[in-house]
Every structure is written in C-alpha cells, then in structure tokens.
Image (tube, rainbow, N blue to C red):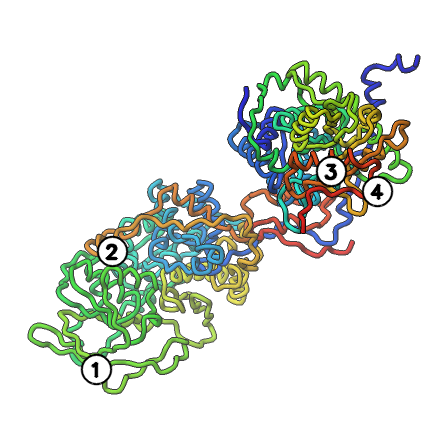
Amino acid sequence: MKEVLEGSHAVSEAVKLARVQVIAAYPITPQTHISEALSEFCADGRMDARFICVESEHSAMAATIGASSAGVRTFTATSSHGLALMHELLHWASGARLPIVMAEVNRALGPGWNIWMDQSDSLSQRDTGWIQLYCEDGQEVLDTTLQAFRLAEMVNLPVMVVLDAFFLSHTYEPVDIPDQETVDRFLPRFSPRIQIDTKNPCAISQMAPPAYYMEMRHDIHKAMRQVESRFEVVEEEFEAIFGRKYGQMEAVQCDDAEIIMVIAGTAASTCRHVIQELRSQGEKVGLLRLKMFRPFPTKQIRQFLGETRKIAVIDRNFSFGLSGIFAHEIRAALCNHDKHPPVFGYITGLGGRDVTPEILKEIYQITKATPFPKEESVWVGLNKN
Amino acid sequence: MGEEKKMTAKQKFFEEIPLFISRSLVSTEVNKTGSWRFVCPEYDEKTAPCSAACPAGEDIPRIEMLVARGMFREAYETILNENPFPGVCGRVCFHPCEGSCNREGFDQSVGIHHLERFVGDMAIQEGYLVPRRSRPGMSSGGGRIAIAGAGPAGLAAAFFLTRLKYRCDVFEAETEPGGVLRWGIPSYRLPDDVLKKEIDRIVSLGVNIYCKKPVTQNFLEEIKGRYDAVFIGCGYGRSIQMNIPGEAMADDGLEFLCNIRKGKAVSACGVAAVIGGGNTAIDVARSLVRLGSKPVLAYRRRREDMPAFGHELEMALKEGVELKELIAPIRMKAERGNIALHLQKMKLAGSGKDGRARVVPDGKKTVTMKVQQVFTAIGAEPGENWYVPPKKQDNILSLSHCTLMDEEMPMVFGGDLTNPVKSVADAIASGKEAAMALDTLFRKGRDAVEERLASCRVGDSGSLSMEIYMEGDRKNRNPHIVSFDEINADYFQPAERKTPRSLSPDESSRSFSETEQTFTKESATEESERCFNCGICNDCDNCRLFCPELSVLIDNTRRINLDYCKGCGICVVECPRNAMSLEKEELR
C-alpha cells in the first residue's frame, strides 16, 4: 500500500516489517524520528520487540551487540557524532561477526555545529568492517533496510543503511509499504550461526593471540568478498517478490558517455535531471549513482567507468590533506586496471549546502574544459569574498 | 573441482563465509572470577530515619512496603510488633517520622501517619486478630504484673508484657480505660469507637482491666506477694494553677475536655480566653469553636515557642481560633456579667536553659480583655506525689522512657511521669520499655537491663524495638541511619504527597465529627509507593539485574555467589535504598 512517508519513517516501517526483536537507540538529529517511531511501535504493541533506552550511542551499539550475540534480530540508528561515539563498537560488531543493521543518517560533524547533510560521518567509518549502502529516496530506504537484514544474516557482517539528512530523512514521498506476509516470505526468521546460551555458558570475543587473530581478520575479509555476489542474490529474490531492484550501483546513460558523473545519495536525483538537460544539448554525459561503498565494488566500477574519457566524482565529504573519499576510492579501483580514465574530484554540498543543477552543470563544464585533472580537489560553490 | 562437488551446500556456504571467532570451548564457569575480588558486597539492611525518629520505633519502611503490595494484614502485624495503637497513633501522634523522612530531600515527606491510620482502620474494619508472637526459648507462665492506669502507657505495658507471656491486671480510676485518649483528646481528633476497638484487642489477649479502681499506696501494700511487679502509669491528672487573683472564675481546660467526652453539659458562650500554649490549650480552643464560642488563645511566649504541635495550631487558626502572643494573665475580675481579664505584656529576654525563648514583663504595659469565659491549660502535674519515682537511690535505674525501682516487688514508673516528651507515642514507648526491662530483670537480673535495652535500640535513637528484643529478623539491621545522600534517587519519580479528604474548616468547626478522613485503599497504596523503603530490601531486583556476573542468586532469600562475584560493587550502587554494603575482603 502506498503511503506518503518521511524517509525516516520508511526506515521505521521496514524495521517493523523485518520483525526486529531488539532495538537500542539514542536520539540524535536527524535520526531521532526513526527511533521515535520505533519506540512507539514497541510501546503500543505494533512491534513485538524490546526497545532499550540507553544513555549514549556507545551503549546503544553495546546493547545491540549483546542482543545480537544472544541470537536475535537487532537494529539501531544514529547519525554524525553519535556514529563517531560508536566507533569502538563498530569494530566490535564486525569482529564478533554480528548481523546488526543500522540506519545512518548522513550529517556533518562539529564544530561548527551543523546538523545538515554531509557524508563525512559514515565515510569516516570506512574501515570498521561494516557493509555500507547509500540510498537515494524513501522507497529505496525501505527496500534496502529489508534487504540489509537478509544480507547481514547471510554473511554475518553488520550493515549500515545510509540516507541523507533532511533531504531524505525528513522529506515526504509516496512509499509502497509491503504487507507483512510478503515481507515474511522474503525475510524469514533469523536463525543465527552463533548464539550465546546461558545454559551453556562460554566466553565469546575473548582474547585471540597472534596465532589466531590474523585468521579471524582474514575470515571477515572472505565474508566481505562474498557480499557482492550475495547482494545480487538478495536483490534477485527481492525483485521476484516486490518488482524492484537497485544494484550495487546504477549507470544512467553511461554506454556512450564521454564524461561520467559519479555521485551518491539524493544529489543523484538532481544529477539525473542535469544529464537529461545536457544530453538534450548534445553533451555525451552519463551518471553513475553509487550505492554500495563497502565492500567497494571494484569490478563494477571498472566495468562502468573503464571505457569513458573522463570521470567527475562529486564528493559531499573531504578527507583533509588528500581528496574527496569517493574520488580517491575510484582512483584506487582503477589504478591497476588497464583502462584508467582521468578522475576529476569535486567537493561540494558540505554541511547541508544545496547541490543545485547549476553546480552540477558547472562541474560538468569544468571537467569538459580541463584536459587533465588537477592533483587537488576542486571545491565548487564556495562563497565569493 | 572434483573435491568441491562432494561438498554439501551447507559445507560450501561455510567454506565461503567462514566464521572464525574467539570463543571458549569449555564453560566459563571454570573461571572463578570471585578470586579477583578485594571488596565484597553484602545484603546489609539498615535503619530508616523515620523508624529512628518514631518514639515507638515502628518499622516504617517495611510497613509502607507491605501497604504498597496490598498486604494490609501483614502491615498491621508489623505495626503491632511495636505499637498496639495504630488507629489511635495514626490520628493523634505528632509524627516526628515525617519530619525526618528522606523523601523530604526529594519532594515531600511520605504521609506516614495517614498510612498508619489507614492500616489501623483496616485492621478494625476487617477484624484482624493479634497474631501470636514467640521467640526462641520463650517459656510460658511468666509472672503476674499489676498496672496502675489504663492510659496509653499502661495499656502498652500490658500488651507487650502479655506478649512476653506475663499475666497483667490493669487498675483504672476512671469508669472506662483509655486515660488521656478517652478523656483528654476531643472526639474530632479521636473517635470513641477507634479507641474502644483497639483497647478491646488488648483485652482479647487476656488482659484484665478493672475500672473505678484507683491505685493507692495502701492498695500497693495489699497486693505485695500477689504480683511480681507493678507498672505505674498514672499520668498528669492535676492541672497547674495560675495563682492569680480571681482564678476561681476560670474553668479548668482538662476538666472541660473530660466533661465533653463524658457527655456532661458544658457551657460555652461569647468570647472565651484560653490561657496556655500546649496541646490541651489547642484542644480546648477547638472544642470551644465547635460549641459556638469565640476562643482567643493567650500565650505568654511566641507562636514558635508553643509546645503544641504545629499542625494542631494551624488547624485551630483555620477554624477561627485567635492567637495572642506575649501576654500573661495577672488578674481576673467580674464585670457586669463578663470577666475582665488583665494581662501583662511580655517581651523577649534571651533564651532559657531549654533553648526556648525566655520572656519577662514588658515594663508596666498591660492589656485587658473583656471575655465571657476563661479556660486554663498551662500544664498538668501528677495527681499524687508518689506517682513520680524517687530520685537518686541505689536501686533506681533511669531508662530512656521509664524508671525501674528494683525492690522486693519491683516497680516501673512510665508514661508522662518519666517521659521527656509528653506524647502518646512516647507513653507507648515507655510501656514497651517497661515490659523489656521487667522481662530482663526477671531473667537476667538488674545488671543486665541497660545493656539488653541498648541492644534493642532503633538506630542511634532512644526508641526501642520489641521485634529486636524478641529476636526477630529486625535484629539483623545495621543501626546505621540511611541519609538522603545514600538513596539512589535516580530510581524515583517525583510524586505529589497524597492527603485524605478532610472537612473544610467551616464544616469541621461546627461539629465534633472527625475532621480528617482515612485513606482509601487506592490512595494508601499510591502514597506508600512514594516511600523510598530506606535501608530495606523490597525485592526490586536491581542487584540481580545489574550484576555483570549473574552472581545474585535467589533461593529462599537473596545471596551473592561468591565464587563469581568480582566485587565490582555495581549491585551496591544500583540498590536504590542502601540495603547493601561493600565491605573490604578478608585476606585469603
């Protein structure tokens, strides 16, 4: 049934439909609406789940880890400083191989204090062993959250479903909410591969000396390597039931494109319009909308970007002293590939600043006019003095 | 490839997505984490400040816990262990318990006296009996005790001595038992039937009460040999005189109250001056309001110096009693059918030995009040001089609430005669102390009395617990008095104190019916839930829920599994009511 929903509530609805058993969350703008709705579902009996109120995000993740270790389906949500506070436990969750699903609303970090859209928070957690999936609209948020549980439980790794602050979390759109029976067909009860049991007490996640630790890390890597193919399976099953599919990334008019703009999140929707307009003017431009960031889908990146002449990567984040993070990852993916078009890096839309069609067109024009990319990223849309 | 084909789908899955994590193969129970401990938690129930403040030493946190659980009978039995008069005390006690309530530091004190009254009335309504109490090694067939005076002290002595297996005969000068409760306290504060039911309950234990039998010195001689001991609780029956000219025109306040209770015709008209600042003065004034006159309280000191209980004075003022401070009567004169009451104005002159303000005449300034009646209520003294124990004799043992004279037939003086604070609860306390003192005297001799009583103190206060004397569970309580700082207030929500319905001052000033009502079950339960239950375990389960080692076990009682308790102390910190302590571990 279609309903007009806030992006945040698309997450909440999916979590309800996923029959999550334990939720532990701490409020932070712009994530609060997600856990707020869930706490209401738990309170009024619409969800048969335990909502654990905690005093910080660190504890939210700790409680989620505890519950997940006990073999139940778990969820939490956070944003920005909240995610930063969880950092230690993000490593723990993946190291303990727990299939936790978290909604992460992309928000800037302070100071200066800023509650708006920015990708720095989730990208800073790049190396924690979490699968990261970036969404573009409310429907994708709902669908991806449902898929995330399947995927996480399949590979025993935690999944972060990422959505833009306000542009997505607080924007109302028509969203098709599937019925419970159909979701149950797609997402059966969680049957954990590992589970603590008070009747047979044992120690878990305890000391792993040099003789073992490396193998454990290698196993995480092996599981991560399976994610791309398993994601395909999950998507196929999902498509068979619900008729929707997103892919690890989405290529729009890339086949003959001489310049491909690469972007993640809601700004991709703006970019879709921009390339239409540019195409109508005879420009050979395409869009590659990134969804999966971890594991980094190198194979598909090479496939979609290898043949083009120039790549313009638009980052709403910045790794100080280097580059936009998406741009840098793409450079790395192409570097040992025989086809390696130049990668132009653009920084724009930080801290909630709009990424307007004009900005995107400007980026296209710069890319077109510049033969070789500068070493430095180009910051677009800075205030003029 | 050939090998791969042999694998089942499940094996293949496990091969592709391996799950090697650190996990012990054996039970973690082999790791006795208790060996890490250097401090050890223990269940250590402590003393609530209200209990220590209660002259009768009632186990208030436990009573409120039981009321909160709807266990009204058990609450009643818990009160009865320390006080046979919950219905009476819930009404007339000045409730020092509430003044020391830790909840005061949070929002407002718990309405302890309303709850006591509720439990008392519940017992009367449901006809709860007095349960049998026994203690280890208590034999039947104790001695016989004569008790002079059926006031709260004498009746309490009879009750506790009977529970200690003594046979008691109470001798009362008046026509009915009750003493000040029956004759002194007006019925709008204490209705007859409540008192009667609670006295009946004492009689039901086998106590004989002989009325119209004043105890004289001759009588004491006569009964020698028939009784093993005597308790003297004759109270303050004689009013103190003002010794001023024209005093004969004044009525005695105590007698006035007594006449009302006896149903005798009393006259009350116009303006009445009530001389005094104690509870009797207030009772006289409030009774006068009900009889249609306009009472004016004339007190020689200031309002804050009045010995009357604050809430009583407040009620009186609400009902229309007028208060004039710093005036002392000097002369009364008849004047055309009225009384001209001349009063000396007083002024402050430092403070006296007792800490109260001292007042002296303010020069020659006087005032004259034209009134129709004058009542005196400036204090009372023992009816007979020998009611008071002799001072400083070898065989005299002065205890906190009574005095023991060890003679051939030992005598204990109690009640108002020996109590530093003249209150009903203190009178009950003296009866209880007398029972413990006599029992110890008979069993262990005089030298053992003081030490034995000291071991029955509630906290560090003068109140004594019969439950501790009887070696009930309460004797294991730590005498440490829990302070507000020791309460983990995070576990409590602010909640407004509930008060039962009461008549408006306008309604109450027109009748002798009871001003205040009793709590309903619902309000009693709600109010009792406000109690912190300071120092006692109410099975909130926090210790068990928070223990990271699952070391809190519940079999019959709660205990700590020391094999695994690491001594982290979380249980002690999370106990909302300081019913646990952390002790340094003995070196092993």
3 or 4: mark nearer the eye: 4
Q: Distance between the residues labelled 2 and 1?
A: 33 Å
Disc 3: which residue: A315
Q: How far is mark 1 from mark 3, CA to CA?
A: 95 Å
Please, what is the three-letter code of the amino acid marked with disc 3?
Answer: Asp
**Sequence-first tag of 2 and 1:** 1
Residue at the extreme right of the image, as rendered: B2
Q: Which amino acid does label 4 sit on?
A: Glu
Within the image, what quadrant is residue B14 found in?
A: top right
The 10 Å Cα crowd at callout 2, few under 14, some 14 to 19, many 20 or more, is: some
User: Where is mark 2, residue-wise?
Assistant: B505
Circle 1 — which element? Answer: strand
Q: Which amino acid does label 1 sit on?
A: Thr
Q: In this view, does B19 lie to the left or right of A14?
A: right
Tag count in the figure?
A: 4
State which mark lies toward you, 1 or 3.
Answer: 3
Mark 1–mark 4 Cα distance, whole angstroms, equals 104 Å
* Residues behind callouts 3 and 4 on a single chain: yes
Residue A71 can be seen in this image: yes
Residue beneath label 4, please? A375
Q: Name the residue under label 1.
A: B366
Locate the N terminus of chain B and report the quarter of the image it occupies.
top right
Mark 2–mark 3 Cα distance, whole angstroms, equals 77 Å
Q: Where is residue B256 in the image (x, y as percent from the top left)?
A: 20, 64
Residue shown at the point (79%, 38%) measured from the top left: A127
Q: Earlier in the sequence, mark 3 or mark 4?
A: 3
Name the residue: 79% across, 41% down. B31
Q: Where is residue B237 in the image (x, y as percent from the top left)?
A: 28, 67
Q: Is label 4 in contact with label 2 (beta carbons under 8 Å)?
A: no
Q: Which of marks 2 and 3 is in front?
A: 3
Residue A199 visible in rendering? no
Instruction: Please state if B122 lies on the left or on the right of A211 as rendered.
Output: left
